[in-house]
Amino acid sequence: MSIHDLVFLTEDASHDAAINHINEEAFGPGRFVRSSERVREQGPHDRRLSFVAADRGEVIASVRMTPILAGTVAGHLLGPLAVRPSHKNLGIGRELVRIALAAAKKSGSPVVLLVGDPPYYAPLGFKPTKPGALTMPGPFDPHRLLVACLGDVDAMALEGEIRHRDLV
Ligand SMILES: CC(C)(COP(=O)(O)OP(=O)(O)OC[C@H]1O[C@@H](n2cnc3c(N)ncnc32)[C@H](O)[C@@H]1OP(=O)(O)O)[C@@H](O)C(=O)NCCC(=O)NCCS
């Protein structure tokens, strides 16, 4: 089994059940208390920037992107990112992040934020944010709040509340 045997598709509603299963398997019921999940429940994700990987018709990995404001800057929150255990360490997670970032850049989004492990995301273009400058509706480790700057934005200048763009 190699990554070249897979197809990468833009997410649509027919993928929802498989994605829910993958995320439940990866994160368990505790996933709903994570601060990034608090933001995600404020409004819908953007399917045009969300992708799945399929192996012979079966969805085995997913990445979602949610439109947010980081202070006054409009961008996206990446996640959840999850790969089924049967398909880990084949480069699928990294490829989904690369595809999502390319799509976000093409759409004109200047920043993509996420809460995640720096060693995994740094080689994919994510940098630290200024610790304490950005808030979310719940606690998180500020050293795990990372940003990929796709436009003319200074990561260290981002400040304010991270919230869904639909939230008034
Ligand atoms: C994290 C996850 C998405 C990685 O997907 P994947 O397709 O297996 O990863 P890739 O094949 O792209 O990359 C594998 C490499 O990343 C490393 N890696 C995996 N998870 C890592 C982590 N949390 N921190 C640092 N490195 C990590 C692996 O050790 C491997 O390193 P190597 O290339 O030197 O051998 C997947 O393991 C997963 O679904 N985990 C559970 C959910 C999760 O934690 N999601 C991320 C939330 S931030």
Image (cartoon, rainbow, N blue to C red):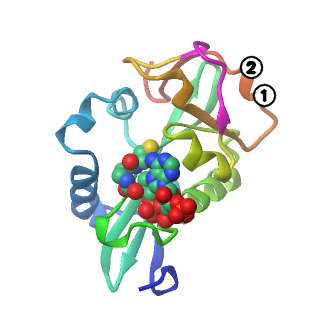
Of residues 59 and 139, the one nearer the viewer is 139
Magenta stretch holds residue 77: no
Do tag 2 and tag 1 residues touch (Cβ < 8 Å)?
yes
Magenta stretch mostly in which secondary structure?
A: loop
Viewer-proximal residue among 117 and 106: 117
Horizontally, residue 25 falls left or right of residue 79, namely: left
- Please identify the quadrant where the C terminus is shown: top left
Q: Label 2: few (<14), some or many (≥20) within 10 Å?
A: few
Q: Secondary structure at mark 2?
A: helix
Residue at the image position 66 percent from the left and 43 percent from the top: 109
Relative to residue 133, is residue 50 depicted above or below?
A: below
Q: Which mark is residue 157?
A: 2
Q: Kindly indicate the quadrant of the structure image that contains residue 143.
A: top right
**Residue 132 in magenta stretch:** yes
Task: State which quarter of the image contains the N terminus.
Answer: bottom left
Q: Residue at x 72, y 28 (%)?
A: 155
Please say whether residue 78 is visible from this viewpoint. yes
Picture layout, residue 116 above or below residue 159: below
Mark 2 near ligand 1 (CB under 8 Å)?
Answer: no
Q: Which mark is residue 106?
A: none
Residue 83 pos. (x, y %): 37, 62
Question: On the picture, is 8 further left or further right than 122?
Answer: left
Q: Nearer the viewer, residue 61 or 107?
A: 61
- Identified at 65% across, 52% down, the residue is 124
* Vertical side of 145 occupied by 133: above or below: above
Magenta extent: 127-134
Q: Which residue is mark 1?
A: 154
Tag 2: amino acid: Ala
Classify residue 60 as left or right of residue 97: left
Name above or below for residue 102 compared with residue 109.
below
